[in-house]
Amino acid sequence: MKTKLLAIFVALLLVAVMPTIVSAVPGAIWTTTASCGEDPQNANHYAIGDVIYINGENFDEGNSSWDITGQPGGASCDPNTVVASGVVSVGESGSFCFEAYTVANDDCGEYKATAGNKHDNYRVDEDVPVVPEFGLIAGLTTILGAIAGFFLLRRN
């Protein structure tokens, strides 16, 4: 009889405690390029100079710490190194978005973005060509055109 009562008590205790243990912690994060929002959601490949935004939703209101850390074991050029960190303020909507980091020249491999207890991985691809800004190309073309024009006018 004692064994049955103990078994029933343990079963009731597990039924009462299990939903608390199994329930998921609220919140989700993802990274985007160039701006906040959905498009392109969950961008996971970046080039040197790209800006990484961390987006979150369904978080509890309050402050939440965040960081970006290089992955260990040769997966990153910054193994176990926090390359950016801070605190984000989550409003009553439970959503947030902020400019977290600009990919540095010496970054490569896998990084993990963390906000609260949520994570999202992204990769810095070294093979992605870095396209120079239009201003640099336009400036060089203008200078070369001016030099060519100078020599053509001097020749006449």
Image: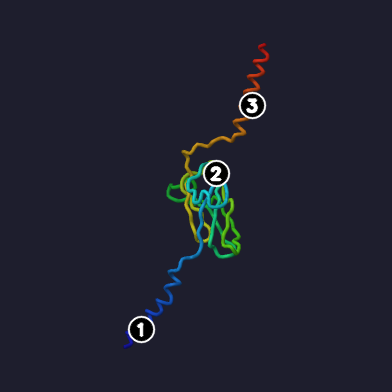
Q: Residues within 10 Å of mark 3 (few under 14, many from 20)?
A: few
* Distance between the alpha carbons at the discs numbered 1 and 2: 60 Å
Residue 54 at x, y percent in the picture: 55, 53
The residue lying at 58 percent from left, 57 percent from top is: 96
The residue lying at 33 percent from left, 87 percent from top is: 2
- Residue 103 in the image: above or below residue 134: below
Q: Amino acid at mark 3?
A: Thr
Query: If the image is split into quadrants, where does the C terminus sit?
Result: top right
Residue 123 at x, y percent in the picture: 47, 47
Q: Residues within 10 Å of mark 1 (few under 14, many from 20)?
A: few
Q: Nearer the viewer, residue 119 or 78?
A: 119
Name the front one of labels 1 and 2: 2
Label 2's element? loop
Mark 1 or mark 2, earlier in chain:
1
Q: Amino acid at mark 1?
A: Leu
Q: Which mark is residue 135?
A: none
Quickly name the residue at label 3.
142
Quickly name the residue at label 1.
6
Residue 76 at x, y percent in the picture: 46, 47
* Distance between the alpha carbons at the discs numbered 3 and 2: 27 Å
Q: How is the image coloured?
A: rainbow
Q: Which mark is residue 50?
A: 2
Q: Is residue 98 left or right of residue 20?
A: right
